[in-house]
Image (tube, helix red, strand yellow):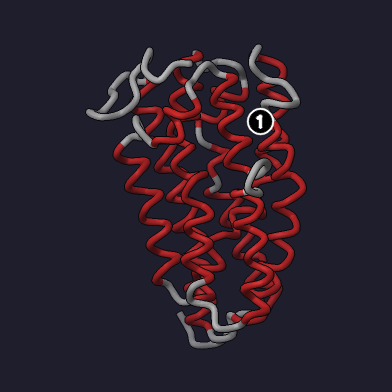
């Protein structure tokens, strides 16, 4: 690696290439899910485990904000927490995810308790929160840029679930529809911030590595689901079919 900085266009192209090569829309579990090939127990396992990721996102963002000395940046980033936590009484991505849990036959309180989350899922998600808490700000922000690639998979998911599963309705899939509106807003700000502030070659390579790391976090969760619930090697302590039903 040379010390010469990348141009903005080159840096953006390398960040976007990560999605083309490594984003979890390419994982066979998602292909199985969107094609209607998952059993309901596989769907429930996905909902239970993805909960840990969903519930950790606002904590990740709060950890990031605690390090920001710029109040302007904190004000902008705060909307991410509000998007997921919602208000006191209603709204927010977390509550929408629990609506999905209820629709697939799970007890929302069971899902919200975090019981049944696979060890690999917990390890990967907790590593992501720790990374954002400790990494340089440019790298921490760059790790969230998987949102650049999310609208396409949400669109595929909505169409696939509506076509193949009886639990899927506009109401139960509201989490994904809402993210189609929220993610582009977040990406627009974050990508511009990273391109502006990753000035040295080292900072740029850190941003690229951070986004690669985040794709690893997402991919590892699906590998665990495939191993546990498609291949049938459910680890100790993980959700088992029949548990936590409504």
Does residue 138 appear in the picture of this structure? yes
User: What is the secondary structure assignment of the residue under circle 1?
Assistant: helix
Does residue 194 appear in the picture of this structure? no
> For the point 56% across and 56% down, which residue is it?
18
Vertically, is 144 above or below 2? above
Q: Where is residue 92 in the image (x, y as percent from the top left)?
A: 65, 44
Q: Where is residue 176 in the image (x, y as percent from the top left)?
A: 68, 37
Q: Position of residue 159 (x, y in %)?
A: 73, 26
> For the point 68% across and 69% down, which residue is it?
76
Q: In which quarter of the image is the N terminus?
A: bottom left
| Residue farthest along the front direction in this orientation | 89
The residue carrying mark 1 is 157
In the figure, is residue 120 to the left or right of 187? left
- In-front residue for pair 234/104: 104
Vertically, is 103 above or below 63? above
**Mark 1 neighbour class, 10 Å CA radius: few under 14, some 14 to 19, many 20 or more:** many
> For the point 56% across and 24% down, which residue is it?
33
- In-front residue for pair 244/182: 244
């Amino acid at each position: 690696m040379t010390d010469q900085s990348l141009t903005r266009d080159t840096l953006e192209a390398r960040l976007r290439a990560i999605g083309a090569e490594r984003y979890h829309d390419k994982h066979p579990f998602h292909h199985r899910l969107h094609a209607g090939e998952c059993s309901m127990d596989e769907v429930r396992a996905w909902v239970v485990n993805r909960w840990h990721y969903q519930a950790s996102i606002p904590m990740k963002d709060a950890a990031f904000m605690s390090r920001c000395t710029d109040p302007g940046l904190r004000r902008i980033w705060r909307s991410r927490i509000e998007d997921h936590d919602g208000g006191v009484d209603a709204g927010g991505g977390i509550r929408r995810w629990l609506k999905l849990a209820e629709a697939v036959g799970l007890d929302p309180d069971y899902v919200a308790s975090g019981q049944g989350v696979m060890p690999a899922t917990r390890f990967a998600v907790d590593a992501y929160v720790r990374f954002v808490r400790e990494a340089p700000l440019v790298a921490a922000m760059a790790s969230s840029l998987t949102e650049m690639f999310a609208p396409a998979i949400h669109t595929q998911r909505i169409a696939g679930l509506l076509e193949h599963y009886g639990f899927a309705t506009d109401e139960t899939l509201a989490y994904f529809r809402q993210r189609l509106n929220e993610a582009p807003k977040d990406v627009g700000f974050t990508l511009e911030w990273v391109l502006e502030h990753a000035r040295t070659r080292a900072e740029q390579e850190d941003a690229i590595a951070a986004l690669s790391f985040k794709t690893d976090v997402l991919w590892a969760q699906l590998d665990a689901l495939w191993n546990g619930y498609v291949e049938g090697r459910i680890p100790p302590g993980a959700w088992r079919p029949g548990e936590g039903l409504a």
